[in-house]
Amino acid sequence: MKIYFIELIDLPEELLYFLMAGFSTTNDIIISTDSLDEKLDISIEGLRNKDLKTRENSLRTLQTLFSQKYIYDLVSSRSENLIEQLVTCLRKSNESEGQLAAIVTSLFIIQLGESNDELFIKFRDAIIPILRDESKSSSLRKNYAKAIGIICFVACEDISATVELMKTLETIFSRSYLHGDGTVSIINHDLQELHTAALASWCLLISTMPNNITHELIRTYAPAKIPGLIESNNSDLRNQAGETVAVLYEIAREINSVFAEPPESLLITLEKKANESAKYKGKKEKRVQHATFREIYNSFEEGTSPEFDIKFGREILEITSWTSRLYYNTFSNLLAAGMNVHLKENGFLRSVFNLDDLEIDDMQQSKSNRFERHLAKKAAFKVRTQALKKTRANKAIRSQYED
């Protein structure tokens, strides 16, 4: 098995932001440590401005700041103002502003890294009406679908609220299900990208569910509904459906579900996609599809899982499962070049990847105690994150499905 080794090197800020040009579509903003308080306050105040450009520039500054720095204390002390302004920006549903607000809200939630159902409800109530509104642009709804998945993953402890959100997301991507006669739904590209985002968030949330609920979701979606999306004519949706299938069956095996073995029809489909050579597809599209589905097919036939290491500073993050790769892709796509900073300093993100506790001094002890209480509260809902290392000695006891 190939082991990929990626090293994230600590770089000067100026060089780091230069390298970020390949990741970010926003204007790069170099923020020195000395100006963090000032930049944060000016940006929050800018969100109140009546001028759209001013608000957008403030959101871009917050995006850069929240992704490249871990500043829990500064963010927490201003959280009330930030929440108020972000909710307002989200509700305005202006496309460019809304897309930026969705990204910044996700980053804000990652900065806090705390369970807070009340906070989840505030953002959910701002996002869901627009997510459901078919008169809004698919691009805006796509960003909202991504954001609400991350917000729920981090902040929501209410299982029923998470299940309800998953139903909303499924209502969206179900438009791409195969018809009763097995034919593919004809949908425009922008809607397919929305469906891909909704499916990705749905997949993220199923990994947090207790086993009895997970069993029922696997029974309902794994045999045919999600696999049917693999036949989509959109490459992103095809690949996301394939990876979702891999996550579903990985979890099914983990909880000893009676649905842990895939039907023969699914294996045939996976093998077909791993070797498909349609002339109408571009070389890059075929290459990505072949690699994705070959890896998924092998996980069923040979029992393999994605495996690669990521070195950051003096530590190594081990990715050893489909679920852990899902988490890594979700957060690294959002944090971009700031991923190594958050892996080193963000306690919540470290808990997601089951990294060792941070070394702290006495001045940080109270913050650590608060974080430990936070982890205890989230244990029942995020227990699958403990399966991300090969050793499971400290794995929490989960409820088991009873036939």
Image (tube, grey):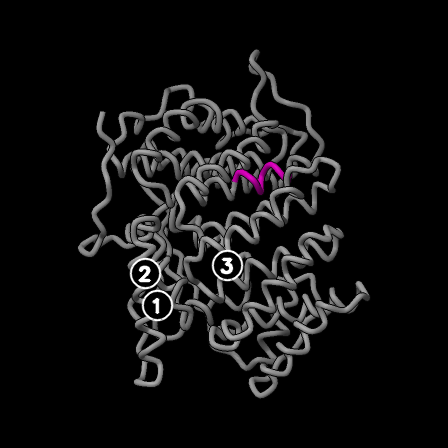
> Would you name the residue on which mark 3 appears?
332
**Crowding near pointer 2: few (<14 within 10 Å), some, many (20+)?**
some
32 left or right, relative to 264: right
- Work out whether 88 lies above or below 186: below
Question: Given the image, on which type of amino acid does mark 1 rest?
Answer: Phe
Question: Given the image, on which type of amino acid does mark 2 rest?
Answer: Leu
Badge number at residue 236: none
Q: Nearer the viewer, mark 3 or mark 1?
A: 1
Secondary structure, mark 2, is helix
**Crowding near pointer 3: few (<14 within 10 Å), some, many (20+)?**
some
Q: Are marks 1 and 2 in contact (CB under 8 Å)?
A: yes
Which residue is drawn at the image coordinates 50% and 57% (left, top)?
Answer: 119
Outermost left residue: 393
Closer to the camera, 275 or 42? 42
> Would you name the residue on which mark 1 appears?
371
Q: Earlier in the sequence, mark 2 or mark 3?
A: 3
> Would you name the residue on which mark 2 appears?
375
- Work out whether 283 lies above or below 226: below
Magenta stretch in the rendered image? 193-199
Question: Given the image, on which type of amino acid does mark 3 rest?
Answer: Ser
